[in-house]
Every structure is written in structure tokens, then in C-alpha cells.
Amino acid sequence: MWPPPGDRLAREAKARAPGRYDQENRNKWLTQEGYDLDYPFYGFEDVDLVDDHGDSVHGHYRQWLRRHHPAVEALIGPKAATPAPDYVLTSFGQAWRTAVPQELYPSAYIADRTIERLERAAGQPFFIQCSFPDPHHPFTPPGKYWGMYDPDEMELPPSFHTGEVPPPHVAWLRRQRDGGKAVKHTPAIFACTEREAKEALALNYGSITNIDGQIGRVLAALRRLGLENDTVVIFTSDHGDYLGDHQLMLKGPIHYRGLVRVPFIWHDPRQPVRGASSALASTIDIAPTILARAGLAGFNGIQGKSLLDVMSGKTARVREHLMIEEEGQRVILGFDTRIRCRTLPASVKVVGT
């Protein structure tokens, strides 16, 4: 661990720090009846918390499930899962065939709560963040989505068999795999086999299709409530995942494109976007863009830039480069110290034809 135990902040100092740092504490949500957040929570006046991934999430979802479907809570997790011996990923806990019905799975709950909030908006201005924990490992797509895609029909990423000479830390991961020493049951990145990559792709596609269906329900509610032509809809993600890219699985401080490039779709019925853009953008640009579209000033010191002029075609880019930073706490990937990773993507200027 980093820093070493002697250099860490004393428990007494932590206890005196202002604010609550236990609001997303899994154990408290699962063991304390009526446990709740302090509001506003990250600026939100009203929140239904669904934290963690797969079917084993906690927060308000588990409280709701316990109250309304108590028998279903016992179906959560790998111990209650339907056997799926054909999947290697189930042997070390990166996937399980959840017994939770798809209509009660966390993704359905999130869409239900989002639709309820749209119905309560009653024509008043609103900002709703509808955040799905899936698609993510562990891979637990519910119901029909588990077997919707066949691993045997999956195509491996082109980078799986390029014959490239990997950087030292990627080579170390591959040696761990080839020597039977890879740690595959944690959230940490590992080098995978072809079969593991194909299973992850198939199960991830199932999760994505489930999310597509839930988002479709939300968009249908917008239409039904007459909000379709008066609501900006944004679709994005916090990170990518390695699903066999460069023979890697999950995520970590190795900044290949599959990890650091994420979707960003902006639909504005009143100010149509002029197609796709190759401009360099970052997650820190999302808040300034939303505030600018709402006619609101950002707070003093806000990072990022509004992308409205890029989307309208008034400018081609808002920056020439950006910095991706990752500060690790653990000593991993064969290094002898903690990870401090920096990546500098830069704009590509095309000259001529």
C-alpha cells in the first residue's frame, strides 16, 4: 500500500474532518435499516443510490428490494446463481448467471425510478442523472441477456494477435498468465486467454443490450409525457474496459484507447448537432457544456470547456491536447513503486488530401 502505514493520516485527524465519508459504505447500507444520504448529495436534491456493480449492488435499491421483494434479495450473488459451467469466467468470480429476474434487476429499477422522476417533473425544469452500473464486471446480465450472444461467435479485438512487442508492464501481465500466476478474481487488470475474452465480450454485449432496452423505456416516457422536444439527452460513460484488447481484461493504469475513449452523444432537439466530431474532449467538459446550454455560469475555478461551439460547427476544437492522469495507491504490474501514469493525447491536424 502507498503511502506506507507510518505516513498515513492519523485516525484522529480523519475523525475530525468535516462531512460524512461513509455515505457509500456498503456494509452500512446492508445492515442498518433506514440508512440514508445527507442531502444535497453531490448537488442533487433527491437520489436513489445504486452503488457497486453486477447484481450485487447496494444502496436504496437493496432497501426497496427488501421491502417489496424480500425473497429476491436472497437470489443476489454468485452463491445463488444458476450454474453456468461452460463459462470459464464463472470459475473465478468474474461472471455468474444471476437468479435475479430481469424485471427486478438493478438496471430495471434505475429506469423505473428515472421514469417516476420524469412524471413528477410536471413541466418544471429538471436535471436528471440516470446512471447504470452495467455494463461492468462482474458480468451478470439477467434473464434472456445472459445467453443472447454466443462466445464462440465473438471476434477478438484486432490487437489480440498483432504480434506487437508489449511494454514491460503488459509483458509482465502476460508472463503471469502464461506461468499460471495471474490473479483473476479481483477488480485488477489481468492478461486473459482467448476464451476469457470471448466470454467477456458476449456477456458484456448482453448487458449493453439490456441497458439499450432500459434507455428505450426512459426515452419512450419522455415522448409520452410530451418532453421529447424540450429535453437535451446526453449519453456517456466514465471509462472503457479491456475485453481482450492487447490480451488484457478489465481496467487499470495502462492507457490504451479502449480504456480512455468513451462515448459522448448529445441530442438537443432545439439546437441540432452537426454530426460527429474528432475534437479532443474530456469528462471535465461535460459540466461546463451543460451549464452553458442552460444559460448558467460555471462556478469560480471550474475545469473544462464548453463544447457547444464544437457541436454547432463554429469551431473545430477547444484544445490541442489534454492530460490523462492516474495516481495509484498500490504497487502492481511488476513495478517496485506505486503507479503514476500520464498520457497526453494531442489533436491530429490533416494537411492536404
Image: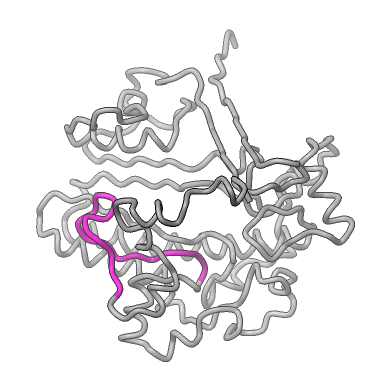
Secondary structure predominantly adopted by residues drawn in magenta:
loop
Judged left or right of residue 91, residue 108 is left
Judged left or right of residue 132, residue 176 is right
Q: Residue at x 69, y 64 (%)?
A: 199
Residue 66 spot, x, y in % from top left: 36, 84
Judged left or right of residue 240, residue 339 is right
* Magenta-highlighted residues: 35-54
Residue nearest the viewer, comparing 50 with 200: 50
Q: Residue at x 44, y 33 (%)?
A: 282
Q: Is 263 covered by the magenta stretch?
A: no
Residue nearest the viewer, comparing 333 with 323: 333
**Residue furthest out toward the right:** 179
Q: Residue at x 30, y 73 (%)?
A: 35
**Residue furthest out toward the top:** 352
**Residue furthest out toward the bottom:** 71
**Residue furthest out toward the left:** 123
Residue nearest the viewer, comparing 9 with 304: 9
Q: Is residue 37 above or below residue 267?
A: below
Q: Quadrant of the C terminus?
A: top right
Q: Is residue 302 above or below residue 123?
A: above
Residue 309 spot, x, y in % from top left: 31, 23
Question: Residue 150: which quarter of the image?
Answer: bottom right
Residue 261 spot, x, y in % from top left: 54, 39
Q: Is 51 covered by the magenta stretch?
A: yes
